[in-house]
């Protein structure tokens, strides 16, 4: 294990991992002083893709995982869309007749449907990292827990009782507020997730292929018991940019890294272009 | 020849819902697909399971044996979901 860890360490000191000495950053962020003594701070790439078509985003998502630009943290805001988990079937999960004004695609990780409406009150993030058994554990649930910690720290910042619920959820007072999905590729992981700021249960039921009608009100009440969102918990709407900035800070603290705003490399852009036909294809989405 | 209609079996594991759609012919699995919101890595290994199950006698022991074999061969990790969960889902489709 030691030798493989060394290998990973040497990998992470390749050209894409600029080490930055930052005493100042550590004094501000690191809770345990012993860690501050002798560590250099990694510089990680940060990208905010803004409002995007989900198909373009999923192509970029996969390109970041399969590219070679090092650890990256990113945000995006999807236009009205639904994205299916890798193993789901569109016609089984969705009431397709009610989904005509949604853009639908599939992602490369498992898990369930995520949908976003016109209001866009949700924060979507992605993390690509090299699995090193330190920051990113090999154990899948442990690695979910580590990354979900960023969301939990953010929610705790707002005074909420947030916790990790295995396998891949973040809950506030036992209600799910964030769903997360991870896949892995050649020693790296990609985790995508959503932090709900607002959520329209009725709309979710309308687009889902769940028998409703009869117990519609009861169903909504029971979903409200199991699911929540930030605006509801706080009783007010916080500015999305403010929340994202807190997430960035919590990310830097948790991963002992400094986020530096960057863009996709030429290679990632080329990879994205080669992946676009898949995410736009009927075969991929409706297989 | 007795070909059954495609039937659906649903089983919930801790890792997610597993839906199996199975058609049999004379007790042999003729066609099968598996979908759901579970996690399984590497993802493509699920297709290997599905391909390998076609033409196999539709009984619990045989299904379990094949799924476990592919889990081992492909180093499958599926947090919250075990080979038995897939077997259970397929068996539910067979018992409909």
Image: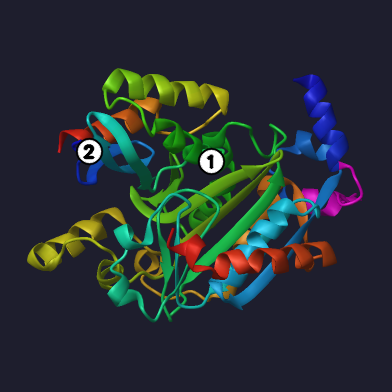
For the C terminus of chain A, the image quarter is: bottom left
Spatial CA distance of label 1 from label 2 is: 34 Å
Label 2 residue SS: helix
Q: Chain of mark 1?
A: A
Give the magenta part as a residue range.
A13-28
Q: How is the image coloured?
A: rainbow
A103 to A143, vertically: above or below: below
Q: Residues within 10 Å of mark 2 (few under 14, many from 20)?
A: some
Tell me residue A80's x, y (percent): 45, 77
Residue A218 falls left or right of residue A37 = left
Label 1 residue SS: helix
Tell me residue A24's x, y (percent): 84, 54
The answer to whether one can see residue A242 in this image is no
Tell me residue B16's x, y (percent): 36, 42
| In the foreground, A95 or A220 | A95
The answer to whether one can see residue A186 in this image is yes
Tell me residue A266's x, y (percent): 84, 67
A46 to A4, vertically: above or below: below
Which residue is depicted at the point 68% across and 51% down? A128
Residue receiving disc 1: A145
| In the foreground, A253 or A83 | A83
Q: Chain of mark 2?
A: B
Q: Nearer the viewer, mark 1 or mark 2?
A: 2
Residue B17 falls left or right of residue A276 = left
Say the numbered circle drawn on residue B93.
Answer: 2
Which residue is depicted at the point 22% across and 38% down? B93
Q: Residues within 10 Å of mark 1 (few under 14, many from 20)?
A: many
């Amino acid at each position: 294990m030691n030798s493989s860890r060394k290998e990973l360490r040497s990998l992470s000191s390749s050209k894409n991992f600029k080490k930055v000495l930052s005493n100042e950053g550590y004094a501000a962020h690191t809770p345990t002083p012993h860690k501050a003594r002798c560590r250099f701070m990694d510089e990680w790439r940060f990208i905010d893709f803004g409002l995007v078509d989900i198909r373009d985003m999923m192509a970029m998502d996969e390109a970041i995982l399969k590219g070679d630009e090092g650890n990256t943290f990113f945000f995006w805001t999807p236009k009205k869309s639904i994205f299916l988990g890798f193993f789901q079937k569109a016609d089984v999960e969705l009431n397709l007749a009610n989904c005509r004004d949604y853009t639908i695609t599939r992602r490369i990780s498992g898990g369930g449907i995520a949908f976003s409406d016109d209001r866009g009150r949700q924060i979507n993030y992605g993390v690509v990292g090299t699995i090193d058994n330190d920051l990113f554990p090999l154990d899948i649930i442990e690695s979910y827990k580590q990354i979900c910690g960023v969301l939990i720290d953010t929610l705790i910042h707002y005074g909420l009782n947030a916790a990790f619920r295995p396998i891949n959820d973040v809950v506030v007072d036992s209600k799910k507020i964030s769903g997360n999905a991870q896949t892995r590729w050649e020693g790296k992981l990609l985790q995508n997730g959503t932090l709900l700021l607002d959520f329209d249960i009725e709309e979710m039921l309308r687009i889902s292929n769940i028998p409703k009608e009869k117990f519609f009100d009861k169903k909504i009440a029971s979903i409200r018991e199991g699911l929540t969102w930030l605006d509801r918990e706080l009783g007010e709407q916080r500015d999305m940019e403010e929340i994202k900035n807190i997430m960035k800070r919590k990310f830097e603290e948790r991963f002992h890294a400094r986020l530096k705003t960057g863009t996709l490399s030429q290679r990632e852009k080329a990879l994205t272009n080669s992946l676009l036909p898949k995410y736009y294809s009927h075969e991929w989405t409706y297989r | 020849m007795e070909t059954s209609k495609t039937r659906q079996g649903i089983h919930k594991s801790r890792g997610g819902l597993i839906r199996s759609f199975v058609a049999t012919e004379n007790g042999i699995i003729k066609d099968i697909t598996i979908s759901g919101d579970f996690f399984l890595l590497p993802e493509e290994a699920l297709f290997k399971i599905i391909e390998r199950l076609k033409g196999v006698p539709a009984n619990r022991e045989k299904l379990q044996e094949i799924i476990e074999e592919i889990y081992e061969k492909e180093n499958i990790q599926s947090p919250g979901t075990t080979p038995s969960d897939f077997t259970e889902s397929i068996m539910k489709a067979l018992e409909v």
